[in-house]
């Protein structure tokens, strides 16, 4: 045990030292971004833990026959989704397929979350995460499973289809916004230039979780044009999952739920990263989920729009 502890602490010490040096250098490199982007999701998700967490974790560890580290991350995601869903739904006026409206009580939300858990387990099996090539692809597909399953579960509880998509997108954005805010924090602290903030953050995200390793993982052509960064994705595992589960269930609304959430997050996400009180830091003429051969993303350093008031 002592040998293992010392053997593990030596490389860890060097890694932490390197991480610190790059953090204060003004030019963050791969070590900095790998460290920051690995810790950020765990910090955000761990903040969601409450008194009921030990029971939930025990349930997850019993039913999931997967490596412990991945089970722990999955448990944190589950906790974050549950808490965020409660926060949104308790204050939401819901529109039913009948045209009526109502507000859910806490018990109604709990019943929805039970349905969500069943839908998630079924969709996760269909996603076949074990065959994805890296952890980043598995993590993003796991998150996409929850998004698509949430919309399906809401519809099963009588919520109107378009409204179900909107609620699932809002819950997903709440989680994504907080994670993206933390992941982009180093670049926003180290630079006031919106172009650098975008390039540094996106370059970091291209290390994890969006590393281009080829299908069935992410596949992308990445290049810079002046101060703008282009990321042209020709394969996206979450989109592939959403399209496959929609075809498997003969339910095109599952893919539409993905389009209305994941495929729309990048516009406000880019503006959040740039943090210059302007909109328009992101352009994407084509989208895989609409049947195009590429998501040709451009993260724009400079725009002409006036500051928001």
Image (cartoon, rainbow, N blue to C red):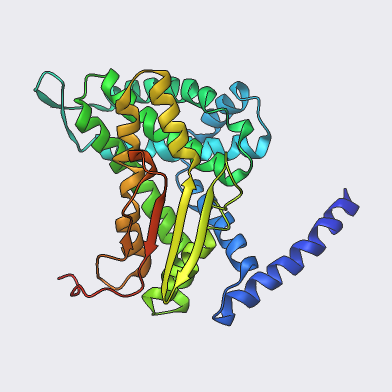
Q: Nearer the viewer, residue 128 or 24?
A: 128
Question: For residue 71, what is the image quadrant?
Answer: top right
Q: Farthest residue in the left direction?
A: 100
Can residue 35 be seen here?
yes
Vertical side of 244 occupied by 141: above or below: below
Name the spot of residue 72 as percent of width and height, x first: 60, 38
Name the spot of residue 134 as percent of width and height, x first: 63, 43
Question: For residue 284, what is the image quadrant?
Answer: bottom left
Vertical side of 103 occupied by 235: above or below: below
Please give left or right for residue 138 compared with residue 290 in the image. right
Q: Farthest residue in the front direction?
A: 293
Can residue 188 be seen here?
no
Vertical side of 306 occupied by 266: above or below: above
Q: Nearer the viewer, residue 211 or 170?
A: 211
At a point 20% along the width and 31% down the height, the residue shown is 162
* Quadrant (top left, top right, bottom left, bottom right) of the C terminus: bottom left
Q: How many marks?
A: 0
At a point 37% along the width and 74% down the height, the residue shown is 194
Name the spot of residue 291 as percent of width and height, x first: 36, 38
At a point 56% along the width and 54% down the height, the residue shown is 208
At a point 28% along the width and 25% down the height, the residue shown is 154
Vertical side of 274 occupied by 132: above or below: above
Q: Nearer the viewer, residue 302 or 73?
A: 302
Name the spot of residue 262 as percent of width and height, x first: 36, 44
Q: Nearer the viewer, residue 81 or 187?
A: 187
């Amino acid at each position: 045990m002592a040998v293992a502890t010392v053997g593990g602490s030596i490389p860890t010490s060097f890694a932490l030292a390197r991480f610190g040096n790059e953090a204060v250098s003004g030019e963050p490199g791969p070590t900095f971004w790998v460290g920051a982007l690995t810790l950020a999701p765990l910090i955000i998700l761990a903040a969601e833990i409450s008194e009921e967490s030990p029971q939930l974790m025990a349930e997850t560890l019993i039913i999931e026959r997967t490596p412990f580290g991945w089970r722990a991350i999955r448990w944190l995601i589950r906790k974050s989704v549950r808490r965020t869903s409660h926060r949104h739904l308790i204050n939401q006026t819901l529109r039913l397929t009948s045209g009526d409206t109502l507000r859910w009580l806490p018990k109604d939300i709990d019943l929805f979350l039970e349905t969500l858990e069943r839908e998630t387990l079924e969709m996760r099996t269909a996603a076949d995460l074990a065959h994805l090539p890296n952890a980043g692809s598995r993590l993003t597909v796991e998150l996409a499973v929850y998004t698509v399953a949430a919309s399906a579960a809401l519809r099963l509880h009588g919520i109107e289809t378009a409204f179900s998509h909107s609620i699932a997108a809002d819950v997903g954005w709440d989680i994504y916004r907080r994670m993206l805010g933390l992941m982009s924090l180093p670049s926003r602290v180290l630079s006031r230039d919106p172009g650098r903030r975008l390039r540094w953050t996106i370059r970091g995200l291209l290390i994890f979780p969006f590393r281009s390793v080829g299908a069935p993982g992410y596949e992308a052509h990445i290049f810079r044009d002046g101060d703008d960064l282009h990321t042209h994705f020709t394969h996206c595992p979450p989109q592939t999952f959403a399209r496959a589960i929609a075809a498997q269930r003969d339910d095109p609304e599952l893919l539409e739920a993905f389009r209305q959430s994941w495929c729309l997050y990048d516009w406000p996400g880019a503006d959040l990263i740039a943090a210059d009180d302007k909109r328009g830091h992101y352009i994407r003429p084509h989208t895989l989920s609409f049947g195009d051969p590429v998501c040709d993303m451009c993260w724009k350093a400079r725009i002409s729009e006036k500051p928001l008031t």
